[in-house]
Amino acid sequence: MRVAASVALAGLIVLGASGCEFISPQDTTLIGQVADGMDANLGRVDVRNAMMFTANGTDASLVTTLINTGASSETVSMQYTSSTGPTTQQVTVPANGSITVRPGGQTSVTLSGVNAKPGSLFPVYFSTGSRNATVRVPVLDASLPGYQTLTPTPTPVAPVPTPTDTGGATPTPTGSATPAA
């Protein structure tokens, strides 16, 4: 009797300890995105790890990789709302290839006149001839290591001379007398 009770108790312990394996989801079957950006599928073109970087909240660099698995090149349009209304930029992705979009990359896309504050999500409408997706792209700043070169490069502004600027020459006082030799 004691042996039967011990065996039954051991069976219940084993069943109780392993029963949760049958009903709980396995962590290895749940694949999550492990990047800062967002992904989208446009048929033969994949948008991977799309992010935006801004220093001032009104101009932002789009950083992403576009992968074309098709046998012909694809034009990807990126539409967003700027201060002047809907704005579209296009990038051509080669057949069976990819293109890196980032400052200093294969191509650069700057979204101008936007209201994109770091920490927000900014909607960008990606489309090819047959497929489209609106992606809520995370907006980041350049404060993290490795991100310092990803904000848009400001357009240089030529200095405007002021009336007191003499171009490096020493000003000659007006109305002063020159001593006689």
Image (cartoon, rainbow, N blue to C red):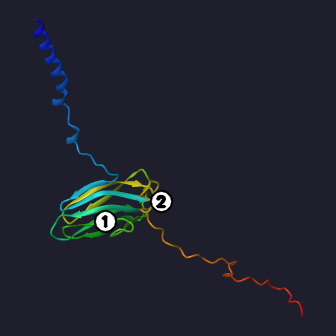
Query: Which disc number belongs to residue 21?
Result: none
Residue that protrudes farthest toward the right in the picture: 180
Q: Nearer the viewer, residue 51 or 181?
A: 181
Image position of 119 with respect to 83: above or below: above
Residue 127 spot, x, y in % from top left:
25, 63
Residue 133 spot, x, y in % from top left:
25, 57
Tell me which amino acid carries mark 2: Ala
- Residue 88 quadrant: bottom left
Question: Which residue, given by chain and number where applicable, does mark 2 sit on?
Answer: 55
Question: Which residue, given by chain and number where applicable, does mark 1 sit on?
Answer: 100
- Residue drawn 69% across and 81% down? 166
Image position of 174 with respect to 148: above or below: below
- How far is mark 1 from mark 2, CA to CA? 21 Å
- Residue 5 quadrant: top left
- Name which of mark 1 and mark 2 comes first in the sequence: 2
Q: Secondary structure at mark 1?
A: strand
- In the displayed structure image, the side of residue 143 where residue 127 appears, left or right: left
Q: Nearer the viewer, residue 178 or 143?
A: 143
Please state the total of marks drawn on the protein image: 2
Between marks 1 and 2 in the image, the one whose residue lies nearer the viewer: 1
Tell me which amino acid carries mark 1: Thr
Q: Secondary structure at mark 2?
A: loop
- Residue drawn 48% across and 68% down? 154
The quarter in which the N terminus is drawn is top left
Please tell me how crowded label 2 is: few (under 14), some (14-19), or many (20+) other residues with Cα within 10 Å.
many
Residue 122 spot, x, y in % from top left:
37, 55
The quarter in which the C terminus is drawn is bottom right
- Residue drawn 26% across and 46% down? 32
Residue 60 spot, x, y in % from top left:
42, 62
- Residue 28 quadrant: top left
Residue that protrudes farthest toward the top in the picture: 1
